[in-house]
Amino acid sequence: MFNKSITLLVVLCFLICTLSKAQENAISFRSDEKKRARKDSCYIRDYSELLMFGVYTSAPFMSMKMNTLTDSLGKYNSDFQGNYSGTFGFNVGYKVLGVSFGFKLPVDPATIDSLGKSAYSSLGIKIRKKAFVISFDYRKYKGLYDANTQNFNTTLPSKTPFIIRPDMGIRSYSGTAIWNASWRRYSFSAPVTYCDRQIRTKLGFLLKVDFSYLQLYSDSSFISKAQQVAFSEFSKVHSIDALVFKTGPGMGMNLTFFKRMYISMNLFLMNNNLIYRYTNDLNQESKWRSNVNYFLEGGAALGYSAKHFYIGIRASGENNVVRLSGTKIQTSFGTVCLDMGFRIKPPEILRKTWNKTLTRYLGL
């Protein structure tokens, strides 16, 4: 299942890239009769010819809620979270490509006894193509604690008041494409990739498509014995595999002031189409089932961006929902990130190598 899901994700990512290239070629073909399609320099300053290098520190948030659909038994719900201190990492960008990778910072040793020790890793790649921003992301969380423990189990000692699950974790592989209908005058990527800058306030209309593989896993049942009275079939589940396809329209705005400062916001209404199966403690797999949900996703940013220097803080979040056997499972991911970096003239060898390879053969 894992290999099939990754193969499907790679195929989808390839199709998204191919479609984005075809869309841009169509735009360029229509515009070449008069003038080659390009961004309006009165609204957007393009820095893609400069090499961008930056550092960031982020505070990731992850929550996996497992709620019974019987309101009177709500005290038995679980809210699994991680004991994360933050991440320190690097951003590198040139022309259409951006790569980020980070390392987990150590947690406060005083919190390990009560909250456990959590691990977090991530890798992201972004491709920026005029009207499109395409991203591929990997995230892994392991080592969780149940923040709702005290509502259904008060027998634990005060030093360790929460149920700690070092075996429990989440893996996520995703490919996302955002189409910007207003790309000539509104830059969705300016506060995200820092490869260009919005120099006049502008509102834009967006469309988001996301495909992901999500796995929730543990060595034994997600639900403790004290909670089984509120959960039926789900009380024996210890693994869930899900394929998620999300689409939705959105709007974004970059508000600029004092020439180089900005406030950015975006919001999407997402249609979440999900197919899943689960495995119980006897390693019996269920049939594939499906869910459809609607919810909001968005982000915001504030910062300063000049030609050779930028600094900004940004926040974003997303949700996924699964309903099975009288249980609602909601995974929420979010991050608050502080970025700082520089844009410099690229080394001549980088520019020539890029043009002779990626530009010549892939049009990047």
Image (cartoon, rainbow, N blue to C red):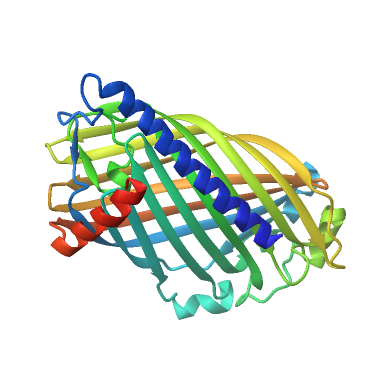
Q: Is residue 163 visible?
A: no
Image quadrant in which the N terminus is located: bottom right
Percent position of residue 250, x then y: 45, 30
Give the number of callouts: 0
- Name the residue: 28% across, 22% down: 31
Does residue 241 sit above or below 254 in this rendering?
below
Foreground pick, 29 / 63: 29
Does residue 353 sit above or below 167 in this rendering?
above
Q: Is residue 105 visible?
A: yes
- Name the residue: 26% across, 50% down: 95
Percent position of residue 202, x then y: 26, 27
Percent position of residue 301, x then y: 32, 44
Residue that extends furthest to the top in the rendered view of this protein: 34
Tell me where residue 211 sits by quadrant.
Answer: top right
Tell me where residue 5 sits by quadrant.
Answer: bottom right
Foreground pick, 123 / 55: 123
Foreground pick, 360 / 246: 360
Percent position of residue 351, x then y: 19, 57
- Side (left or right) of 26 relative to 342: right
- Name the residue: 27% across, 38% down: 263
